[in-house]
Amino acid sequence: MSATDDLLAHAERYADGFAHADLLRAPAKGVAVVACMDTRLNLNRLLGLEEGDAHVIRNPGGVITDAELRALAISQRLMGTTEIVLIHHTDCGVLGFSDDDFGRRLEAETGVRPTWPVASFDDLEGDVRDSIARIKASPFLPHTESVRGFVYDVKTGTLTEVV
């Protein structure tokens, strides 16, 4: 049995006891969370989120790119969120390598240079600040007064705000 088969079996069991048909489309807490896709970061357990509480947007590094700005614009303008939480973490896979080197490596292996930004970074807290600045500078996001960024420590489970 593959990992996907295991996931599908779990989905069937989940559907058997499904009790969330009455949830609204808009997040109950009015918040969107942007975080890294790292498997060590369990946002529901860390933040105490339940289904329907928040929009959760994940990507490598938790960086703010055009794709995340798109998601946040939809979250705010169509779903009513007004707060944004950013979470980066220690020992991140996109920390400390070069976008150009990775792009050249992909091109060497595939014959095609990627058209998308890798968005690696060297400074964890600096990238949280840069991501906050990108959000606050976006004309598409009407609610930027409550944008906060954090670093999650994968060794201790602690969350530290970046100021």
Image: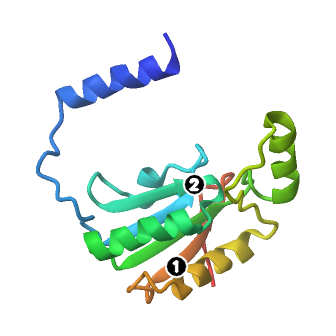
Residue at image x 59%, y 80%?
134
Residue at image x 27%, y 69%?
79
Give percent across and percent down for residue 113.
Answer: 78, 48
Looking at numbered disc 2 in the image, what kind of residue is underneath it? Answer: Asn
Give percent across and percent down for residue 89.
Answer: 66, 60
Quadrant in which the C terminus appears: bottom right
Answer yes or no: is residue 10 visible.
Answer: yes
Label whose residue precedes the other's in the sequence (1 or 2): 2
Could you say which disc has been placed on residue 118 in the image?
Answer: none
Separation (CA) of disc 1 from disc 2: 18 Å
Closest to the observer, 155 or 9:
9
Give percent across and percent down for residue 154.
Answer: 66, 53
Closest to the observer, 85 or 69:
69
Along the horizontal axis of the image, is 110 left or right of 88? right
Answer yes or no: is residue 96 visible.
Answer: no
Could you say which disc has been placed on residue 148 in the image?
Answer: 1
